[in-house]
Amino acid sequence: MQPQLPIDVDPNTGVWTTDALPMLYVPRHFFTNNHTAVEEALGLEAYAEILYKAGYKSAYHWCDKEAKQHGLSGMAVFEHYLNRLSQRGWGLFKIVEADPSTARAKIQLQHSSFVLAQPGKEGKLCYMFAGWFAGAMDWVNDTTDGGKSAPRAQSKEVQCAAEHHDHCVFEVSPIAH
């Protein structure tokens, strides 16, 4: 993993971009404090549902933009997505297994920003990422000839480092009808 990202700052507007996408750069504690405040105000279940939908949509959009920016396709975009998330401080992500044709994948996350920013807190703290992986998988299948017949994806955190595990695990699976 390359630890450095190309960050361009427009001298006229102050807007930061990476790979032609506008970015915000905030300290981890700032983001986590806001995240946990909203979680407390709305309740975990309601907030997780909102984040899932927003994360799904954002991942799908990101994959589309990055594929065009870098000339990537298929699972190479999903892998690039996880690499960029890792480079941006969310944690270290890797695909353990993946089969887009069945909308299945297993993603491992080490050093999650949510776990690191909340020492001593237990539970599944990294649920925010779940929608991201479903959105990325659906993008892969929607843009791949063979993938258009694949089922739609869903994702969930099945193991969190904040539950005394070495790392977090997310599973992507087909939506059951």
Image (spheres, rainbow, N blue to C red):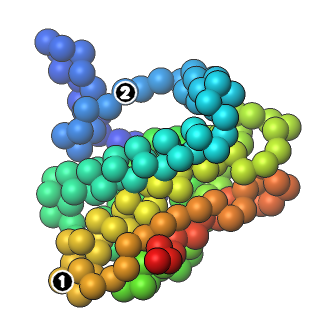
Residue at 43 percent of width and 49 percent of height: 53
Q: Could you tell whether 175 is left or right of 143 in the image? A: right
Earlier along the polypeptide chain: callout 1 or callout 2?
2
Residue on which disc 2 sits: 24
Dot 1 amino acid type: Asp
Which dot marks residue 145? Answer: 1
Q: Is residue 136 above or below residue 29?
A: below
Residue at 37 percent of width and 27 percent of height: 24
Tally the numbered discs.
Answer: 2
Residue 144: give x, y in percent of width and height.
Answer: 21, 78
Q: Mark 1 against mark 2, which lies toward the viewer?
A: 1
Residue at 82 percent of width and 44 percent of height: 122
Q: Is residue 114 above or below residue 79?
A: above
Q: Could you tell whether 36 is left or right of 63 in the image? A: right
SS of the residue under disc 2: loop
Residue 73: give x, y in percent of width and height.
Answer: 22, 70
Q: Is residue 175 above or below residue 18?
A: below
SS of the residue under disc 1: helix
Q: Could you tell whether 133 is left or right of 46 in the image? A: left
Dot 2 amino acid type: Leu
Residue 20: give x, y in percent of width and height.
Answer: 19, 40
Crowd around label 1: few <14 · some 14–19 · many ≥20 (10 Å): few
Residue 96: give x, y in percent of width and height.
Answer: 56, 75
Residue situated furthest top in the rendering: 12
Distance from the alpha carbon under mark 1 to that under mark 2: 34 Å
